[in-house]
Image (tube, rainbow, N blue to C red):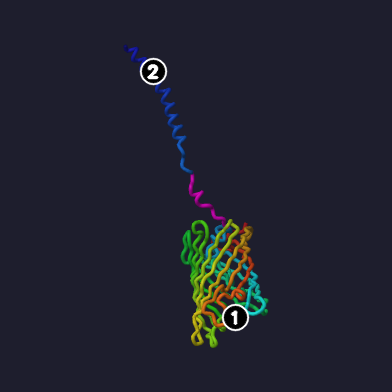
Amino acid sequence: MGSHQHAVGVALFYGLLLFGPANTAHAEEEVAEEPSAPASTEEEEEKPVATFGGAYPVRFARRPLVLDEGMVRADGRLTVGGVPGSGTFSALDIGGAVSPIDKLEVGLSTELTGNVPAPGGNSLITVIFSPQATYGDIPIYARYTYAESDVAQAAVDLTLVLPSNTDFQLAAGLPLRIFELFGLFTLDANLGIRYRNGDKYAAFSPSPSKNTVEFTATGASVTNITDHGYIEIGGGVGVANVGGGTDVKNVVEIPAYLGGGYTYEGKVLADIFAQFGFTPLMTANAPPGRDTFNVADDWYITVGATVHTRPLFGRNSRPKQ
């Protein structure tokens, strides 16, 4: 009986040795066969943003409201448009900007990110060819970003326009940029106020005041079709307090434009762009003799380019090799 129990014990011992590892291996195979969670879903949800010079986005729709610290931008544009009477308006504008410290951009230009395009004849070097050859006005601006997050930025603008050709102007603005809503388009908005001393609204009154105040609300949508190609559409509304004569009403102007461009990335970052629009498309409370839709006089076409350098100084600059 003892030998029989001993034999049974030995058989059980070897059975455990044989079937135990097999069952363990089978269990491990079952665990291995279970579908595993994706290694990283964030990589699929968030595509890396193409950058230039360290952190500046290549995509036009992802650009910040100010240049990165140490970056320099040069810009030029050729504008042709309508004017009252016969002939056309044509001008060449060349300007630029720099970011001397973080979140601050200063320049002599009208090519600010997120702004509705300004009329031709405004820049550091501006030559008006027609209808009469002359030099244009010189805008000096500063923009500071006071709030930002991963999805939006808000800034404040101050602009002084030296009247080399037309009117003295002093303006302030509050630009806002919301980046790629729903992964489709970037929304730009800007509230502004402008003091003007000049003759822009002289035709609106028999005894006009040279001092006017204009309130503007503008916006645009920017969509990058690829990292390098983009389209944009925008417009707004402006209300000018035209004083001086009796029964003078506030003038309402509605600009509109459509544009697009291509970004080249190399040792520099360059945007080549074209825009078509009206300044304005519609004028309400216009003086007698001026049409509400005076598109024959107010159209314009602009072609131009901006060139950005890598950070040349500051914390983002790279030491020379």
Q: Is residue 126 left or right of residue 256?
A: right
Q: Is residue 149 left or right of residue 298?
A: left
Distance between mark 1 and mark 2 Cα atoms = 108 Å
Image quarter for residue 199? bottom right
Taking the image as drawn, is residue 84 in sight? yes
Q: Position of residue 107 (x, y in %)?
A: 57, 71
**Amino acid on which the number 1 mark rests in the picture:** Thr
Taking the image as drawn, is residue 198 in sight? no
Q: Residue at x 48, y 47 (%)?
A: 41
Residue bearing mark 2: 11
Q: Residue at x 53, y 71 (%)?
A: 142
Q: Quadrant of the C terminus?
A: bottom right
Q: Nearer the viewer, residue 139 or 13?
A: 139
Q: Which residues are magenta?
A: 39-51
Task: Residue lying at the far left in this picture: please name it.
Answer: 1
Residue 117's label in the rendered image is: none
Q: Residue at x 35, y 15 (%)?
A: 6
Residue bearing mark 1: 166
